[in-house]
Each structure stands twice: as C-alpha cells, then as structure tokens.
Image (cartoon, grey):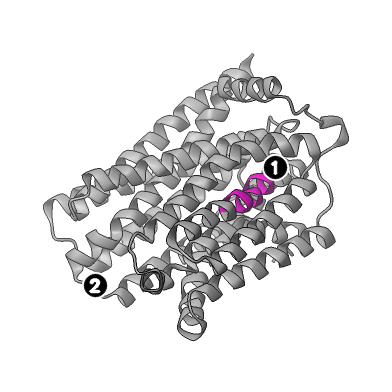
Amino acid sequence: MQRVPKWLLLVGAMTAIGPVSIDMYLPGFPSIERDFATGGVETTMAAYLVGIALSQLFYGPISDRFGRKRPLYAGFLLYTIGATGCALAASMPMLTFMRVVQALGGSAGFVIGRAIVRDSCEPYEAARAFSTLMMIVALGPVIAPAVGGVIVASFGWRATFVVQALIGLSVLYAIHRVLDETRPESDIVPLRLGTVIRGYLRLFADRAFVGYSLVGGFGMGALFAYVTGAPTALTQTYELSPREFGALIGLNGFAFMTASRLNILALRKLTPGQALARYVWVPAILGVVLMMLTMIWQVPLWLFVALQLSFFVSVGRVTPNVAALALAPHGRDAGSASALMGALQSAISTAMGFAVAVFNDERLFTLAAIMTIAAGCALLSYMLAWHEAGATRNE
C-alpha cells in the first residue's frame, strides 16, 4: 500500500475537525441542559453549522491573497479560543456564541485543505488524495461519539471541549512543523471587495464548475437528509434503542472508508472523469429501489440498512472525483473555488435538512423519497457539468 504523505495526513486531520467537533459533544446534550436548567441545546449545533457555512466564503479569497499557512494559523487559533470558551461557558447563549466562534475557525481546515490538494496535485492525483481524505475524515463519526461518551461519563461535558481545544493546539503545531506553503507566489490574487465579488461571479459563470459542485452538494445533501430523518424514522419503525441506533450510525463511517478504498483502486485504471461517469448513476438507482420497497412493503431492518449503506458507498465513490474535476481548472483561485464549492454544498445540505424537518412523518418512504430526489438532482447536475466540460474541450 502506498504511503500517505505527512502533509496529506495533516490536511485530513484539519478536515476531520468538523465531524469531530459535531459528534464528540453529542453524548453530553442531557448534561448540558441539566447544568444550564434550560432546553434548546440543539441550537448550539445549528449555530455551529451556520458558522461553518458562512465563514467558508471568507477563507477562500484570504488564502488566495496571503497563502495557505497564515490563514490556517488564524483559523485554528480562533477554533482553539472558541473551544476553550465552550468549556468555560456559563449559560446556553454563551455556549451557542462560542460554538459560532469555534466554527468560524474550524472551517479554515477543509476550505484551505481542498485548496492545498489542488495546489499540490494534478486532477488524477487529486482524486486519489480526496479519496484518502474521505477515509481519514470518516473515522470522525465512528470514533468521536464513543470517545465523547467516555469523556462525558468520566469528566463531564465540558471536558469534551477541553479535548477539542487541545486538538486545535496540536493541529496548530503540526501546521508549523509539517506544512509548506503551497500557493505559488505568482498566483497572488488581490484582496479587494470588487476583485472578490468578480472572482465569485466568474466561478458562478463556469457552469462545469457549478455542475460538479452541485453533484457533490446533492450527494452530501442526500446523506444529510438521512442523518437528519433517521433518528425518528428508524427508531419508530424498528423500535431501536439509542445504543442500537448509535451502532447503525457508526456503520456510515465504515461505508465511507469502503468507498474511499474502492475509488482509489478504480483510479488505477480510470481517470476521475471516467470513474464519475461510471458511478454517478448508482445513488439514484439505489434511491428508487429503496423508495419503491418502502412504499409497498414493511422492509426488514437488515435489508433497509444494506440498501442505505450501499447508497452511502455509492455517494462516497462520487464526491472525491467531482471535487478534483471542479477544482482542476482553477489553480490561481483555488481557495475561492474551494470556498464557493463548500458554501454551495453546505447550502444544499441545509436545504435537505429543512426538507426533512418539513415533510418528515416518521415514515421510511418519505425519508427514502427525499434521498432519491437529492440523488436525482445530483445526476442532473452531472449531465450539466458533463455537457459544459465537453463543450469546452471541443472549442
């Protein structure tokens, strides 16, 4: 097996900060509400997600102007301050505010991380690198809740944020020791409001870039819809205990690791574009099968989980390739391209979450239908991107 470079491991750690920060403190939700004698702990999660979505658009242009390392220093220092503030929070509003601060810092990791991959790799290598990143990041949802449960049980919920602050400091040190500046000096983009706006408008005008970004966005949106709706739909339908449901959620991380390994193997013979063309159809087909079965039959739990995990694996085989293809033509403004791609995907995932909240009737069919619609939109977006990329090649 080919050895993973240190810089890619570091980028994986920076990218995994997001899932770890979301999942590690979940076991502490009841304790947080007891300590503050109030409900609404879910708002701290929503605040983190909003902070992630909004801050991405700022890190892109900043990293195109000042390079990759200096914004990462600032981002992870802010993340560490936010995590420390969460550990010391005296009220729910203060905890919510410090979660926003933490998110504003943590989003630097995956925005600039994607740009570093684009700086360092050609499209073929980038697709393999993004697959490796997905494998590393997939460990977060598997490990973080279990570790968080042990920490909460042993030391209380505040200790989860102390651990996150220590992770932030460790990443800061690793950035200093391991990471070299990857943005070429010749690619400095002036940081002026007009330049930033024109840059984003130029990216929006690139329909191949937007199409590939939407493929990844709708794919991840389908997964987010499942994660949002499954706690009620699965537990009501199959009468699962919290421990049983937690084990099922943990399997999703292994699905992503499987997808990552399969994509790396496929890229030994295929280009990213060929791999995407071969597998982008699969989520929509699996979604239709899942939707039809849940409409006409009380699907056994084992079959539902098998189809759902297959859906996750198929989406996981698509997303690394669309990231590589979307960023490939945008070397000079890789930071802005990465930021816009991330913002589009966050917006779609949020919209899918709202769709589940509005239409969720605790039926598996409704959940499967939303996932299928998202997968169908991903397929339509691919057709747009493929058409535009083909037109560009033929000019």
- Looking at the rendered structure, the secondary structure element under dot 1 is helix
For disc 2, the neighbor class at 10 Å (few under 14, some 14 to 19, many from 20) is some
The answer to which of 259 and 76 lies nearer the viewer is 76
The residue drawn where x is 73% and y is 25% is 192
Residue at image point 50% right, 36% down: 344
| Residue extending furthest toward the top | 395
Q: Position of residue 221 (x, y in %)?
A: 41, 45
- What residue sits right under mark 2 in the picture? 240
> Mark 2 or mark 1, which is nearer the start of the sequence?
1
Q: Amino acid at mark 1?
A: Ala
Residue plotted at (62% across, 17% down):
394
Stretch in magenta: 103-115
Residue 380 placement, left or right of 335: left
In the displayed structure, would residue 376 be above or below residue 312? Answer: above
Q: Main secondary structure of the magenta part?
A: helix
- Disc 1 designates what residue? 115
The amino acid type found where label 2 is placed reads Leu
Nearest the camera: 100 or 275?
Answer: 100
The residue lying toward the viewer, choosing from 95 and 224, is 95
C-alpha distance separating marks 1 and 2: 41 Å
Please indicate whether residue 198 sits to the left or right of residue 48 in the image. right
Q: Quadrant of residue 333?
A: top right
Q: Are marks 1 and 2 in contact (CB under 8 Å)?
A: no
Q: If the image is split into quadrants, where does the N terminus sit?
A: bottom right
From this view, report whether residue 228 is shown above or below residue 387. below
User: Could you say where residue 7 lies in the image, as x and y percent from the top left?
Assistant: 76, 57
Can see residue 5? no
Identify the secondary structure beneath mark 2.
loop
Q: Is residue 112 magenta?
A: yes
- Image quadrant where one finds the C terminus: top right
Report the side of 26 relative to 295 (left or right): right
Residue 39 in the image: x percent, y percent?
Answer: 32, 63
